[in-house]
Image: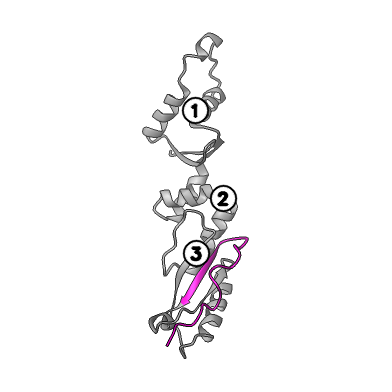
Amino acid sequence: MSPAPFAESPQQARPDGPRIYVACLAAYNNGFLHGRWIDATTPDEIMEEVQAMLAASPIPQAEEWSIHDYEGFEDASLSEYSSFETVCDLAEFIGEHGEVAAKLCTHFGDDLEEAKAAFEDYAGEFKSTADFAEDITRECGTDIPKSLEYYIDWEALARDMEMSGEILVIRTGFDEVHVFWTR
């Protein structure tokens, strides 16, 4: 017997937001690929979609499922058995903060709560860490004489701040860094 086609093609047009591909394990274990792409909306809506997908399974009374794929979560990771609450919370966090949220989550070992907490100490987005070091120095009211400005190595100052653990830097582009205080 040849495997059935996907219930929905995994090559469908990219969604507007994060989504997961949930597969029926009974079908999978019997050589069938049966599943559905589901938008990361609310846990209840996802569960309704999963129940409908299981009801349409080629294997009668299918009950078990797992997440076999996902997209729109940037660099963040989901496991096969991530809760739908986790899926929706992560999708909302990425929707609110973009790529930096996903990279921050990855930095903290996929600990969403730690990533969210880091935003309490968000210093901002800068073109470079050197720009951050210069901005923070000037914000402190430090008056630097014009004759000395060219001798200050802002890049080295920022690197020292990062290496000492004073700041966390998340790079999201060539001229785009996000700085978080680690106090």
The residue at the point 47 percent across, 67 percent down is: 69
- Please, is residue 136 above or below residue 107 in the view? above
Q: Which residue in the structure is indicated by mark 3?
A: 70
Question: Distance from label 1 to label 2 (Cα)?
Answer: 23 Å
Start-end of magenta stretch: 1-23
* CB-based contact (under 8 Å), mark 2 and mark 3: no
Q: Which residue in the structure is indicated by mark 1?
A: 130
Going from N to C along the chain, the mark reached first, 2 or 3, is 3
Q: Is residue 14 magenta?
A: yes
Going from N to C along the chain, the mark reached first, 1 or 3, is 3
* CB-based contact (under 8 Å), mark 1 and mark 3: no
Q: Quadrant of residue 14?
A: bottom right
The residue at the point 49 percent across, 79 percent down is: 34
Q: Which mark is residue 40?
A: none
Residue type, numbered disc 1: Ala
Q: Is residue 152 magenta?
A: no
Secondary structure under badge 2?
loop
Q: Which residue in the structure is indicated by mark 2?
A: 98
Direction bottom: furthest residue: 60
Question: Distance from label 2 to label 3 (Cα)?
Answer: 16 Å
Residue type, numbered disc 2: Gly
Pair 1/3: label in front = 3
Direction left: furthest residue: 164
The residue at the point 55 percent across, 34 percent down is: 126
Going from N to C along the chain, the mark reached first, 1 or 2, is 2
Question: Distance from label 1 to label 3 (Cα)?
Answer: 36 Å
